[in-house]
Image (cartoon, helix red, strand yellow):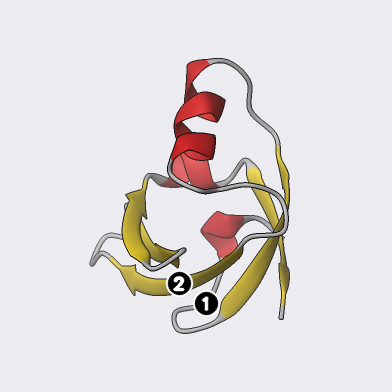
């Protein structure tokens, strides 16, 4: 399952990040690393972006970026 397919209020574990270059560095810098727990806390009215609780901070990600992050439901 991709992070962009997650359900509001549900928790997940990051399994893999399938991006390269500067966007991967940005995701790692905000705490998105394998094994991290994330919770979908907000979906905008049009569905993009989505907000996730990651290590105590709420981070908004575009669907373009979150579709490349593989997660597993808790």
Going from the N terminus, do you reach mark 2 or mark 1 first? 1
Which residue reaches farthest left? 45
Q: Is residue 39 above or below residue 54?
A: below
Tell me the residue at 33%/68% (across/down).
43
Locate residue 5 relative to residue 34 in the image: left or right: left
Task: Tell me where residue 54 appears, x and y as whole percent.
Answer: 46, 62
Q: Kindly identify which residue carries mark 2.
A: 40
Residue 12, position as x, y percentages in the image: 64, 71
Q: Position of residue 39 (x, y in %)?
A: 49, 73
Quarter of the figure with the C terminus: bottom right
Q: Residues within 10 Å of mark 2 (few under 14, many from 20)?
A: many
Would residue 48 be visible to someone looking at this image?
no
Q: Can you see residue 19? A: yes
Mark number displayed over residue 41: none
Q: Are marks 2 and 1 in contact (CB under 8 Å)?
A: yes
Image quadrant for the N terminus? bottom right
Left or right: residue 6 versus residue 73 is left
Element under disc 1: loop
Q: Residues within 10 Å of mark 1 (few under 14, many from 20)?
A: some
Q: Which residue is mark 1?
A: 7
Distance in Å between CA atoms under marks 2 and 1: 7 Å
Count numbered badges in the picture: 2
Q: Which residue is drawn at the image coordinates 54% and 37% (left, top)?
A: 28
Q: Secondary structure at mark 2?
A: strand
For the residues carrying marks 2 and 1, which lies nearer the camera in this image? 2
């Amino acid at each position: 399952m991709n992070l962009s397919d997650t359900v509001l209020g549900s928790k997940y574990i990051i399994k893999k990040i399938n991006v390269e270059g500067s966007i991967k560095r940005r995701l790692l810098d905000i705490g998105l690393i394998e094994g991290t727990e994330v919770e979908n806390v907000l979906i905008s009215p049009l569905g993009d972006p989505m907000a996730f609780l990651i290590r105590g901070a709420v981070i908004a990600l575009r669907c373009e970026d979150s579709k490349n992050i593989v997660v597993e439901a808790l």
